[in-house]
Amino acid sequence: MPVLPSPLRTPMGLVNLLQQLVNIAGKHGRFGVKDVLYGRNAISSFCKERAAENKCLRLALVEPQEAESASLTVDIWTDDYMHMSYSDAHVFWIDPAFEMKHHVLAVRNFGTERHTAENIAKAVQDILI
């Protein structure tokens, strides 16, 4: 039989754990347990997902690179309902037929960090690297 960690062996320990879970759910809304708990395959799955994202990003940038001119725009916005901030990055370019093209590079949760130049630069760097 598995042994519970000592803080959970008392009724108050379990109550405190459950209260902490309710607090987290109240702050962040619904989320999947698998999104927060790491299993033995979590790191390899994460690496595969990042590699696939990077491959898609490289493929998305082929056409702007061939156009020899592109513009990168970054925006940060806050969801009024959940009060969560997001950053997004887009690339725009003009194709040889002089039509404007556009591709969304990423939309990411910006977290609760302040929208300072350093934090924004780090968010952009995380998207592009």
Image (cartoon, rainbow, N blue to C red):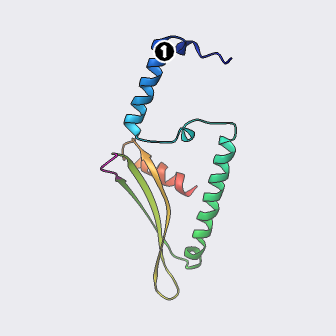
Which corner quadrant holds the C terminus? Answer: bottom right
Residue 4: x and y, percent? 60, 16
Residue 123: x and y, percent? 47, 50
Q: Which residue is mark 1?
A: 13
Which corner quadrant holds the N terminus? Answer: top right
Query: Taken as a whole, is the magenta stretch helix, strand or loop?
Result: loop
Residue 122: x and y, percent? 48, 49
The answer to whether 77 appears left or right of 5 in the picture is left
The residue closer to the viewer here, 26 or 86, is 26
Q: Which residues are magenta?
A: 78-82
Taking the view exactly as shown, the residue that stands out farthest to the bottom is: 97
Taking the view exactly as shown, the residue that stands out farthest to the front is: 1
The residue closer to the viewer here, 127 or 11, is 11
Vertical placement of 49 versus 57: above or below? above
Res 56 → quadrant: bottom right
Residue pictured at 44% horizontal, 58% vertical = 88
The residue closer to the viewer here, 80 or 9, is 9
The answer to whether 67 appears left or right of 24 in the picture is right
Residue pictured at 42% horizontal, 54% vertical = 87
Vertical placement of 7 versus 101: above or below? above
Provide the secondary structure element on which disc 1 rests.
Answer: helix
Residue pictured at 47% horizontal, 52% vertical = 108
The amino acid type found where label 1 is placed reads Gly
Residue pictured at 43% horizontal, 50% vertical = 120
Label 1 packing within 10 angstroms: few (<14), some (14-19), many (20+): some
Residue 70: x and y, percent? 50, 73
The answer to whether 55 appears left or right of 23 in the picture is right
Residue 67 located within the stretch drawn in magenta: no
